[in-house]
């Protein structure tokens, strides 16, 4: 008899638990942010091609500014258009970019753009211009710093040719 009471109690309790809601959540919202690495190959979201440059440098005591120096080509390899693209100078020292770097407002799938800027050489020698790139499609954002080799070469003029 006790066994029958226990079994009845367990069955009634189980039925009650099955008919009553969980009291938990009826809906949930999850924000899944994902960090995606930009890889250096043909499958990357951004195709980046640096254009190493050799720029003439004035004399040993003056800076030389070169306007419209072609530094980088960016190709959109996302599956949708890039709706926001910014490129900024992250360089420290010489050579470096002066002024702002112009970028298109939109870059369609499979298309590319060339990034040019004014570059200053204030010393002779090899260096890099570091460009920080941020591209967004609205749902995905990629950030990358790309180094571009720039050599500032002392110009040989009659005034400084005798110094060598």
Image: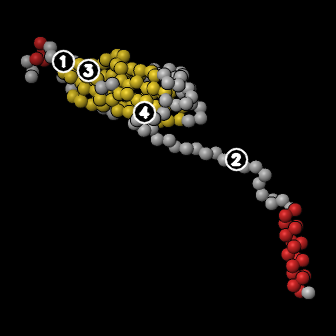
Residue tagged by mark 2? Answer: 29
Residue tagged by mark 1? Answer: 155
Sequence-earlier tag: 2 or 3: 2
How far apart, in angstroms, are the residues tagged by discs 4 and 1? 38 Å
Residue tagged by mark 4? Answer: 42
How far apart, in angstroms, are the residues tagged by discs 3 and 4? 30 Å
How far apart, in angstroms, are the residues tagged by discs 1 and 3? 9 Å
In the structure shown, which secondary structural element does the residue marked by tag 4 occupy? loop
Q: Nearer the viewer, mark 2 or mark 1?
A: 2
**Vertical order, 8 against 130 (above or below):** below
Sequence-earlier tag: 1 or 3: 3
Residue tagged by mark 3? Answer: 55
x and y, in percent, of residue 162 in the image: 8, 18
Q: Residue at x 24, y 24 (%)?
A: 152
How far apart, in angstroms, are the residues tagged by discs 2 and 1? 63 Å
**Vertical order, 132 against 163 (above or below):** below
x and y, in percent, of residue 110 in the image: 49, 24
Sequence-earlier tag: 3 or 4: 4
How far apart, in angstroms, are the residues tagged by discs 2 and 3? 54 Å
Mark 3 is surrounded, within 10 Å at the Cα level, by few (under 14), some (14 to 19) or many (20 or more) other residues, namely many
Give the side of residue 144 with respect to residue 10, left or right. Answer: left
């Amino acid at each position: 008899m006790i066994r029958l009471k226990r079994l009845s109690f367990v069955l009634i309790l189980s039925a009650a638990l099955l008919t009553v809601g969980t009291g938990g959540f009826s809906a949930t919202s999850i924000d899944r942010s994902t960090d995606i690495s930009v890889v250096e190959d043909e499958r990357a979201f951004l195709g980046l091609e640096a254009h190493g440059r050799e720029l003439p440098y004035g004399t040993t005591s003056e800076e030389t500014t070169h306007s419209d120096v072609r530094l980088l080509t960016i190709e959109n390899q996302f599956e949708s258009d890039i709706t926001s693209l910014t490129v900024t100078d992250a360089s420290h020292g010489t050579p470096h970019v002066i002024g702002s770097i112009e970028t298109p407002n939109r870059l369609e799938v499979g298309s590319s753009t060339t990034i040019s800027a004014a570059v200053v050489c204030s010393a002779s020698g090899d260096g890099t211009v570091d460009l920080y790139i941020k591209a967004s499609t609205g749902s995905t954002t990629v950030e990358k710093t790309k180094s571009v080799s720039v050599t500032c070469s002392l110009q040989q003029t009659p005034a400084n040719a005798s110094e060598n």
